[in-house]
Amino acid sequence: MTHLLSFTAGGVTCALPLARIRQVISMVELKAPAGERPGEIGTMNLHGRTVPVYSLRRLLALPDRPPRSGDALVIAHGDPDCVALQVDAVKGVRAGTIPTPQVRGPSSSPGAILTEEEVFIYDLPLFIAAGGSVPLPLPPGTAGADEDETPRDPVKESAILAERARAFSEPEEEPRETTSPELLTFQLAGQEYAVRMQYIREVFIIREITPVPGVPDFIAGIGAIRGEIISIVDLRTLFSIPKHGLTDLNRVIVLSNGEVAFGILADYITGIGIRPTDRLAPVEPGMTPIDRRYLMGVADGSVIVLDAAAILADPGMVVDETRK
């Protein structure tokens, strides 16, 4: 088993091994392509490094569209330098088995194969080099869908992308001896939180939560994940987090320390990246109602890092499914 990052383009779900991912960021303004490679839509300045950006829609031979501020850039280790994939959205991280590549067959193309769940990209440089020249036979009705048809203000969109590009072009700080684990960030009631990847078993979209009588209100219920029954915790209820606007609590982040496992609800996943946790700022009063014993600090000025070890150690988070 390994961890896979799932993302979408034109209604098609794709996946890459998480070990291949450098980071996930929001879409930025692009400069002109460095060459005429198929699928390349431009380049970005990533802290002084020129990174080529490829449209996943083009690489899958799907209907194309201009980049949007709501898109994401999956920055991966290429051969030998980094490359970025423009995707519609990042779904999250999950545990899975790497499929065996097929040399020939109707469900494969250079660097990628079509499984029952998604397009698995097993050789990213080969997939990019093919440039959509051998399109996968995607199931009818799944390809070409635009997941977000919200009307857009071109001027505002351009300003957002340009500001992001400026921020990512700034030089990185000199590296220091530091503890820099991978963090998964997610949105909950208008606030961005983060959890260390070492405590995350998988992230998935849950369709049904079964209520359990006689448990605390913050236990939304139980859910079945690959045959295992786990508790589903609603942090908003547990910590009386105010609800801001519309929410869509169907993403479940499964936390585990090898002995205990349960899920926490999130609105959506916002990214994965490496951040130093020994330089976190203190959580200022009023930033979050979450009890301080469950907090590590604040990263990047606004991302609240949760202490997953402390949350997992709380016996009240787990539902005994044999409870009468």
Image (cartoon, grey):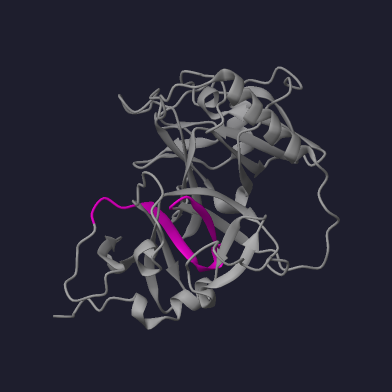
In the image, residue 3 lies at what x, y percent? 50, 56
Q: Is residue 257 visible?
A: no
Magenta stretch, residue numbers: 189-208
Q: Position of residue 195 (x, y in %)?
A: 54, 63
Q: Residue 26: tell me if it is visible.
A: yes
Q: Residue furthest right?
A: 174
138 sits left or right of 103 in the view:
left
Residue 71: x and y in percent read 54, 33
Which secondary structure dominates the residues rendered in magenta? Answer: strand
Camera-side residue of 140 and 30: 30
Q: In the picture shown, does residue 110 fall above or below 249?
A: above
Say if the magenta span includes residue 203: yes
Task: Please count the marks in the image.
Answer: 0
In this rendered view, identify the residue nearer to me: 77 or 175. 175
Q: Is residue 287 or residue 316 the one in the foreground?
A: 287
The quadrant holding residue 138 is: top left
Based on the picture, tell me whether residue 196 belongs to the magenta stretch.
yes
Residues 121 and 314: in front is 314
- Residue 84, image quadrant: top right
Which residue appears at 30% of the width and 61% of the height?
A: 225
Name the image quarter holding the C terminus: bottom left
User: Image check: 115 left or right of 274?
Assistant: left
Residue at image location 83% in from the left, 44% down from the top: 171
> Among all residues in the image, which is located at the extreme front?
286
Image coords of residue 189 (percent x, y) = 43, 53
Q: Is residue 72 left or right of residue 252?
A: right
